[in-house]
Amino acid sequence: EPEVTQTPSHQVTQMGQEVILRCVPISNHLYFYWYRQILGQKVEFLVSFYNNEISEKSEIFDDQFSVERPDGSNFTLKIRSTKLEDSAMYFCASSGSDDLLFFGSGTQLSVL
Amino acid sequence: RKEVEQDPGPFNVPEGATVAFNCTYSNSASQSFFWYRQDCRKEPKLLMSVYSSGNEDGRFTAQLNRASQYISLLIRDSKLSDSATYLCVVPWPTGANNLFFGTGTRLTVIP
């Protein structure tokens, strides 16, 4: 069964450092997303991406965040200068034409 | 009013019980709705989608009431493996598949 894969599963970084979270969406999907979940809180939308550009982004997705699809398979989320409050589980998701989102297993980001 | 509201629970039910969760949403223009299941520290997994009045899949039934703007999930004959957090999810009708998640309802099925 096709799945969304994310690497790394865990990332520990120092405050102020840049991190890149990586995702390989399901191969025939066209829409890509990043969500995050702070421990004990709800899943929150960050950004959606289609046709090589951002479709929509939330208030959380400020200038410190960026996304990129550098090749035909990877979809990355970059946080330029991490803050303590960026500590969360980051989920990548993808969908096809049926609008059903499938999530990766997540990257747990810990900012120290 | 929040986009999506759920009773956080927890719901503790014995095996074999029937349990129902409700969810209300604020945007009357929303057309499709989803229930996801999330196990502890895992990713959300799609359980059911609801596009019309309801959907049934085995022991699970989802119903939609557009007039009252609520969605329900009914689980019959609960199994231990049903223990999880159930997330009510509503796409925001902006055409970009921005999903709004409820806070989730925690279910524990007790032997």
Image (tube, coloured by chain):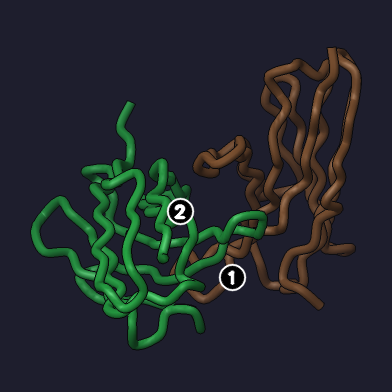
Chain colours: A green, B brown
The quadrant where residue A90 appears:
bottom left
Mark 2: secondary structure:
loop
Q: In the visual, does B89 lie left or right of B42?
A: right
Q: Where is residue A86 shown, x and y percent of the image?
A: 45, 70
B47 vs A61, nearest the viewer = A61
To which quarter of the image does residue B10 belong? top right
The residue depicted at 68 percent of the width and 72 percent of the height is: B29
Residue placed under numbered mark 2 in the picture = A99
Amino acid type, mark 1 = Trp
A18 vs A90, nearest the viewer: A18
User: In screen coordinates, is A33 left or right of A73?
Assistant: right
B100 with respect to A112 (left or right): right
The residue that mark 1 highlights is: B92
User: Quick check: B82 above or below B70?
Assistant: above
Q: Which mark is residue B19?
A: none
Distance from the alpha carbon under mark 1 to that under mark 2 = 12 Å
